[in-house]
Amino acid sequence: MNASWPAIRFTVNGELRAVSVPPMKRLLDVLREDLHLTGTKEGCGEGECGSCSVRMNGDLVNSCLVPVLQAEGAIVQTVEGLATKGVLHPLQEAFLNCGGAQCGICTPGMLMAAAQLLEQTPHPTLAEIREGLAGNLCRCTGFMRIFESVLAAATQAEPEQPHAR
Amino acid sequence: MRGNAETHQLVAPGTLAAVLELLAADPGAWTPIAGGTELMVAHAAGRLTAPRLVSLWGIPDLRFIHATPETISVGGGATFLDLRRNAELAEAFPLLALASGWIGSIANQSRATIAGNLVNGSPAADSSPALLVYDAEIELVSVRGSRRVPYSAFHTGYKRSVLAADELVFAIHLPRRFVRHRQYLRKVGTRRAMAISKVALAATALTQAGVISEIRLAAASLAPFPTRLLRTEAALLAQPVTRGTIVAARAALLGEAQPIDDIRSTAEYRRRVGANLIEEFLLELQQETQRP
């Protein structure tokens, strides 16, 4: 960190944060390196894979394509902000119960894209889920279990059995 | 090689007037950046050569969709999600709404702006064919004032346009006179989302007593920049929609298309698909003219 960079302030998961970093530094790198929020992953680094998806002012964005100066004053939510007080978000519960996560690299981005979708469309069709998650690539699950997880979260389906952790 | 954030300056003056002042003070020194869906990709790959960038993101003067009875005007800073969410635009200009849904994914559509799509000047730009067949006009603004150019005259070559170094795209103006036209837009790519066109074709047309009285055709990836297919249009104007006309239109399109071989497709494939797309559109038009 170089103290000569002017501070850039924004809210992350409800907390006001300030960073002194180059304004062209990617929001992804600021989240991971400066704020130590390593839940957000880097996949392709060019906006194709969705691993770095976060929500900014209510929109889904690829944090690898956001220069941090453009986040000044914004409200940012990362995967770390989904659970509240140790209670998992219904989407996180559903991903666990339905096998929606395997290696885990795509999972934070999938969760954020799914959270965005359910906020806009609380009861999506399978086609709407496919579109909402089209920018998030998974190379483990073949996607079906992810779509089922989102459907389950949307219908608030009771989990078949409590997940052991 | 990774880009180094410390080697690029980025400023955010926050208002249109302040950005225009900055551009005018040293024309060519500053590169505007809006949603970053193009320039940040180059940055990540270490290909961003611009040393000084000025942010257009979040400038309210540029992000609007304004409708009058005659025109819908889209601010250059409107995102493709803004376009998709506007019901009036989708009704008056369905091809533009459709194309907006083709831009990358939701996370790209929430950041990519319509002016960025045009200024970037890709031959494969998704919004361009629709804008061309709707006779869109581009309003450019600088401290010197504003001027309007037909979108069909905006691109002048591969990644080149009439935009001056001190100018920004302020708005895209769409005349609302296409609701009765037969409209067509099809993109051929490798997958529905996140794909860049191998080829795309847009059309608007009117017929009178089975004869084509008005036609506009535009293509992506059939030329060095998005362009109308004027020779193919000429082959169709004042013609009845018959098998012979379709054959002539295919030939005209093959004659004027200048596709290339690249990472996404081959020139030959693009030619053949382009001809198939014009045929598909004309068959739709033929069915319509034969309807009682």
Image (cartoon, coloured by chain):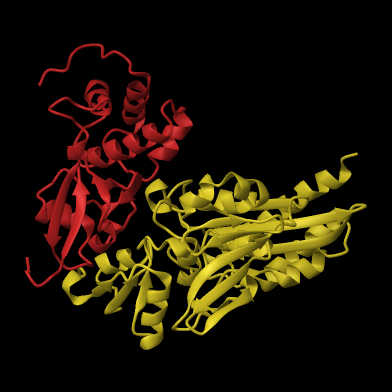
- Does the rendering let one see residue B173? yes
Which residue in the rendered view is the most extreme toward the bottom? B26
- In the foreground, A7 or A122: A7
Q: Position of residue A86 (x, y in %)?
A: 12, 27
Can residue A104 be seen in the rendering of this structure?
no
* Image location (x, y in percent) of residue A139: 28, 40
Q: Residue at x 31, y 74 (%)?
A: B53
Per the rendering, the colour in which chain B appears is yellow
Q: Give the residue displayed 82% in from the left and 48% down from the top.
A: B286
* Vertical relation: B47 (above or below) A12: below
Q: Nearer the viewer, residue B274 or A71?
A: A71
Q: Judge from the rendering whether residue A2 lies leftward or rightward of residue B71; answer left or right.
A: left
Q: Colour of chain A?
A: red
Above or below B218: residue B140: below
Residue occupying the point 25% across, 47% down: A76
Residue A14 located left or right of residue B41: left
